[in-house]
Amino acid sequence: MTMDEDIAHVARVMAPSLRAFRGEPVLPPAYWRKRLQRIQDEFPLNELQTFQIERLLGELDRFEAERADEFTGP
């Protein structure tokens, strides 16, 4: 799998896996964050790949913030 294919795979399956089991993650945000950070740390990335990974990390941040709001409520 190429780096672009790996990033595209994460982009395709991350969001559905975060809400797949009755709204609960099949794979937790920590798994996706670790996977994305490993890609960042271990491979030379071009500008587009860096942008894509940063966008995915932002999606994880938003997901975790939404979950925190669910538990704290108004």
Image (spheres, grey):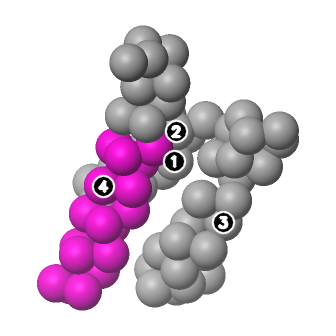
CA gap, disc 2 to disc 4?
11 Å
- Amino acid type of disc 2? Pro
Kindly check if marks 1 and 2 are in contact, taking CB atoms under 8 A apart as contact: yes
Residue 13: which numbered mark, if any? 3
CA gap, disc 4 to disc 1?
12 Å
- Amino acid type of disc 1? Trp
Q: Earlier in the sequence, mark 4 or mark 1?
A: 1
Crowd class of label 3 (few under 14; some 14 to 19; many from 20; radius 10 Å): few
The residue labelled by disc 1 is 32
CA gap, disc 2 to disc 3?
12 Å
Q: Earlier in the sequence, mark 3 or mark 1?
A: 3
Residue 29: which numbered mark, if any? 2
Residue 64 visible in the snapshot: no
Q: Earlier in the sequence, mark 3 or mark 4?
A: 3
Crowd class of label 2 (few under 14; some 14 to 19; many from 20; radius 10 Å): many
Residue 15 or 52: which is nearer the viewer? 15
Q: Main secondary structure of the magenta part?
A: helix
Q: Residue at x 34, y 43 (%)?
A: 61
Q: Residue at x 39, y 56 (%)?
A: 59
Q: Is residue 17 left or right of residue 53?
A: right
Residue at the outermost top position: 72
Label 3: element kind: helix
The residue labelled by disc 4 is 58
Label 2: element kind: helix
CA gap, disc 3 to disc 4?
15 Å
Q: Earlier in the sequence, mark 2 or mark 4?
A: 2
Q: Is residue 62 left or right of residue 26?
A: left
Kindly check if marks 3 and 4 are in contact, taking CB atoms under 8 A apart as contact: no
- How far across and down, in percent of the image, does residue 56 sit? 38, 62
- Amino acid type of disc 4? Gly
Residue 73 within the segment the image draws in magenta: no
Residue 23 or 15: which is nearer the viewer? 23
